[in-house]
Image: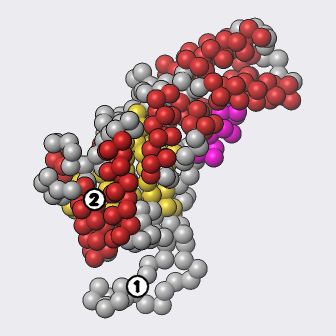
Amino acid sequence: MFSFFRKKAPTEPSPATPTPSAVTPAVVPPVELAVPPPAAVPVRQGWMDKLKNGLRKTGSSIATVFTGTQIDDALYEELEAALLMADTGVKATTHLLADLKRRVKDSKTTDPAAVKGLLADAITELLTPLQKPLVIGEHKPTVIMVAGVNGAGKTTSIGKLTRHLAQGGASVLLAAADTFRAAAREQLAVWADRNTVEIITQQGGDPAAVSFDAVTAGRARGRDVVLVDTAGRLPTQLHLMEELRKIKRVVQKADPTSPHEVLLVIDGNTGQNALMQVKAFDETLGLTGLIITKLDGTAKGGVICAIAREKPVPIYFIGVGEKLEDLETFNAREFAQALLT
């Protein structure tokens, strides 16, 4: 499907298409691909089923709150407890309860079951500012730097993201800048092979140097996207966080306008710790977007509400499994409905 990223439509068609042998390559105007084709609808429905299954544990605990016979203080107290248990956080929970009470009053609702629908509306409104498409085409190549702690699913998410981009017609070049972890280069190479894309790698090379070479190669080869896989690290590992700053500085030397996107991959199972990661990495790198992984099993999902309230960095993608297709664009309404199913 094409809804995962957006390219701006050209105002008028080009009179002629330059040949590959032209001395000066043409600047290809971005193309609008924001609306998915009709064939994507059943695919999206299948994704919704996966998301609902992934968040079923959280949804069932919240849904039980609305099985009573009246809307009273006890209901709101139970809901507050359920939201906090879902890792929604104090600030987001307080906001949602106040918003929900207003909606109940305005609608004159007396049925507890109907309150769940109003809560879905409140969550949707809270999360909608995080719903933003990834833009490809304003720069060539679009340089995307990806960070995350060890175990968050960073390299796997890069493989899935590569599939999305390639399916949308974008040519991708991978940079194996995670030189700290022994198997990282080999793991990324497997994803490159699965997606039939090129990879820039150096055995034991400096991460910043690998990133520089990849951006340079991406420009020379006319690639649409360069994806830079950085080493996993904890925000408390200051020397490694400084390495991220170095990678960003060196990438800017290869292309002063880059990196165009700085994404953080966070594990949906880590609760409020995920919010702390967003804050720390944003301070270090200036995040432009998030990928939330592992929204299945024990994942509570409410942390996305906490992020929306306390550090509203856009969420480009969410993932619910290990397969290549188990990564999709974030949609606020879909997530709210899945969370309360």
* Residue type, label 2: Ala
Location of the C terminus (image quadrant): top right
Label 2, label 1: how far apart the Cα atoms are: 29 Å
Assess disc 1: are there few (<14), some (14-19) or many (≥20) residues with their C-alpha within 10 Å of its C-alpha. Answer: few
Assess disc 2: are there few (<14), some (14-19) or many (≥20) residues with their C-alpha within 10 Å of its C-alpha. Answer: many
At mark 1, the secondary structure is loop
Q: Which residue is mark 2?
A: 208
- Say which quarter of the image contains residue 124: top right
What segment is highlighted magenta in the picture?
120-130
Residue at the image point whose x is 46% and y is 29% from the top: 273
Which badge, 2 or 1, comes first in the chain's sequence? 1
Residue 81, how many percent across, how many down? Answer: 62, 14
Which of 53/183 is in front?
Answer: 183
- Say which quarter of the image contains residue 130: top right
Q: Kindly report the secondary structure that dominates the magenta region of the rendered protein.
A: helix
Residue at the image point whose x is 34% and y is 57% from the top: 246
* Residue type, label 1: Ala
Q: Is residue 179 magenta?
A: no
Q: Which residue is mark 1?
A: 26
Residue 173, how many percent across, how many down? Answer: 28, 62
At mark 2, the secondary structure is helix
- Say which quarter of the image contains residue 96: top right
Residue 82 in view, yes or no: yes
Residue 120, how many percent across, how many down? Answer: 66, 30
Residue 308, how many percent across, how many down? Answer: 60, 39
Residue 54 in view, yes or no: no
Number of the label disc, if any, that sits on residue 93: none
Quick check: 276 above or below 76? Answer: below
Q: Is residue 126 magenta?
A: yes
